[in-house]
């Protein structure tokens, strides 16, 4: 089984970050830290104009949190620390001065939806249905909530949160504003991502940076908000309800 990894490849002012884990691209703490650091590293490079974030494999984009780590959490401090991993990735995407394109080739669950929502521009295939399953295991999409709500609005966010057992189709996600485009094949998706990234890389870098700042205006309170949300998730993951639910999936 392939090892987990996070890589950064650079080509003609476009940086492409690829993350992968063998468990449907679910994200443990180690990979979340690497992803955060790689995004920050890319944003500090003077030779990059655009950032693309994608996952390895041709099926699930990201299955969200690592259940193995969730089960192993023993106290609220550990719980908060784990969920801060997702918070820090979202904040890194927000702070990164590069316009960020997220490529979603398959299903996105929980934190995977958060990654898509934290993009400046997100493209997907028709197989990229989404689900926020957190409330069904006794937690909730608290950390990713601000990013998702910012993209699709309160009504759609509440629908997908409450109906936690259902996958919502890629076209639904496009209609709500999460995806800019939906393609029939991965090949068509990759062509579109490459063209858009290449076009953006040829534009005035100062205009790109100012646009990024404009898009993320009024999100400054997220630093404290996501930390508070991580603490809430870290507390709830220790509840008897959630412990039993997680064990049933083990």
Image (cartoon, grey):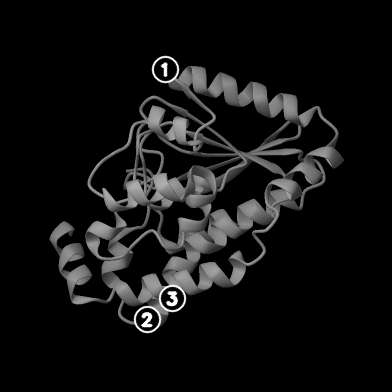
The residue under the point 76% across, 31% down is 201
The residue under the point 15% across, 68% down is 244
Tell me the crowding category of disc 1: few under 14, some 14 to 19, or many 20 or more residues within 10 angstroms, Cα based. Answer: few
Residue 34 or residue 155, whichever sits in front:
155
**Sequence-first disc among 3 and 2:** 2
Determine the CA span between mark 3 and mark 1. 40 Å
Q: Are dots 3 and 1 in contact, CB under 8 Å?
A: no
Residue 143 or residue 219, whichever sits in front:
219
**Residue under label 2:** 76
**Sequence-first disc among 3 and 1:** 1
Assign a secondary structure to mark 3: helix
Assign a secondary structure to mark 2: helix
Q: Is residue 174 above or below residue 79?
A: above
From the top left corner, tell me how far across and down residue 188 is, in percent. Answer: 50, 17
Tell me the crowding category of disc 2: few under 14, some 14 to 19, or many 20 or more residues within 10 angstroms, Cα based. Answer: some
Q: Is residue 70 left or right of residue 102?
A: left
Q: Is residue 112 visible?
A: no
Quarter holding the C terminus is bottom left
Q: Is residue 232 left or right of residue 226?
A: left
From the top left corner, tell me how far across and down residue 66 is, in percent. Answer: 34, 58
Determine the CA span between mark 1 and mark 2. 43 Å
Tell me the crowding category of disc 3: few under 14, some 14 to 19, or many 20 or more residues within 10 angstroms, Cα based. Answer: many
The residue under the point 39% across, 24% down is 126
**Residue under label 3:** 231
Determine the CA span between mark 3 and mark 2. 7 Å
From the top left corner, tell me how far across and down residue 64 is, in percent. Answer: 37, 52
**Residue under label 1:** 184
Q: Are dots 3 and 2 in contact, CB under 8 Å?
A: yes
């Amino acid at each position: 089984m392939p090892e987990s990894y996070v890589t950064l490849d650079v080509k003609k002012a476009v940086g492409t970050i690829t993350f992968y884990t063998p468990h449907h691209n679910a994200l443990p703490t180690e990979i979340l830290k690497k992803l955060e650091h790689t995004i920050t590293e890319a944003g500090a490079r003077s030779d990059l104009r655009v950032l693309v974030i994608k996952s390895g494999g041709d099926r699930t984009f990201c299955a969200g949190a690592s259940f193995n780590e969730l089960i192993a959490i023993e106290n609220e401090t550990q719980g908060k620390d784990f969920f801060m991993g997702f918070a820090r990735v979202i904040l890194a995407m927000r702070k990164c001065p590069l316009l960020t394109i997220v490529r979603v080739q398959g299903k996105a669950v929980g934190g995977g939806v958060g990654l898509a929502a934290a993009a400046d521009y997100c493209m997907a295939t028709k197989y990229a249905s989404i689900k926020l399953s957190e409330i069904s295991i006794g937690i909730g999409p608290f950390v990713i909530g601000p990013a998702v709500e910012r993209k699709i609005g309160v009504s759609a966010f509440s629908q997908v949160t409450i109906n936690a057992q259902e996958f919502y189709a890629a076209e639904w996600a496009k209609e709500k504003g999460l995806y800019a485009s939906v393609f029939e094949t991965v090949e068509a998706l990759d062509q579109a991502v490459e063209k858009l990234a290449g076009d953006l890389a040829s534009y005035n870098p100062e205009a790109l940076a100012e646009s990024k700042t404009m898009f993320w205006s009024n999100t400054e309170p997220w630093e404290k908000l996501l930390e508070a949300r991580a603490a809430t998730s870290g507390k709830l993951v220790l509840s008897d309800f959630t412990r039993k639910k997680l064990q049933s999936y083990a």
